[in-house]
Image (spheres, grey):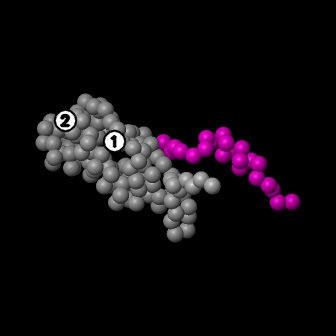
């Protein structure tokens, strides 16, 4: 029997929730270097841990980043995103003063973001499974 180590348990639930997040810089300015991205990885990992979540994957380019986060059901994605963006912006400003010229009115990130649920079986398979449940007679 194989065991899925991604399944986590809470006090009253069993869960396996993943979200793919994408953040872009304000006006899509190309400001990230490899050193900044590496620092960001650590910041994002710490913020995720504060929420009881795990940063599974992180990568970025000059003007945007992708995160894959495994999170508990009590976490509101919007609160996690606000914390990730706010904390990273503050820490990066202190650690990389040269970034200051790229901040627009104190903002590094665009206010928008992408969040997509991911993992598990495709929707069509789950839909078919639910449709074929035995109905009481």
Q: Residue furthest right?
A: 137
Left or right for 35, reference 97:
right
**Where's residue 10, x and y in %?**
51, 65
* Mark 2 and mark 1: Cα distance apart in space: 15 Å
Residue at image position (51%, 59%) is 8
Q: Position of residue 123 (x, y in %)?
A: 62, 42
Magenta residues?
A: 116-137
Q: Quarter-wise, where is residue 37 in the image?
A: top left
Q: Foreground residue, 17 or 99?
A: 17
Q: Which residue is mark 1?
A: 111
Outermost residue on the bottom side: it is 11
The picture quadrant where one finds residue 12 is bottom right
Which residue is painted at 51% across and 55% down in the image? 5
Which residue occupies the foreground of this view, 5 or 32?
Answer: 5
Query: Badge 2, how many Cα within 10 Å: few under 14, some, many 20+?
Result: some
Residue 76 on the magenta span:
no
Residue drawn at (15%, 48%) of the image: 94
Q: Secondary structure at mark 2?
A: helix
Q: Which residue is mark 2?
A: 102
Is label 1 in a helix, a strand or a loop?
A: strand
Residue located 52% across and 63% down the image: 9
């Amino acid at each position: 029997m194989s065991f899925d180590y991604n399944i986590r348990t809470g006090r009253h639930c069993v869960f396996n929730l993943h979200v793919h997040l994408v953040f872009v810089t304000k006006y899509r300015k190309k400001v990230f270097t490899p050193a900044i991205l590496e620092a960001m990885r650590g910041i994002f990992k710490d913020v995720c841990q504060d929420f009881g979540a795990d940063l599974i994957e992180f990568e970025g380019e000059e003007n945007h980043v992708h995160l894959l986060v495994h999170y508990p059901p009590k976490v509101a994605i919007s609160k996690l995103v606000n914390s990730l963006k706010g904390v990273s912006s503050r820490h990066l400003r202190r650690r990389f003063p040269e970034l200051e010229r790229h901040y627009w009115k104190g903002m590094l990130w665009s206010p928008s973001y992408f969040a997509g649920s991911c993992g598990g079986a495709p929707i069509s398979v789950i839909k078919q499974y639910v449709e074929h449940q035995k109905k009481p007679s």
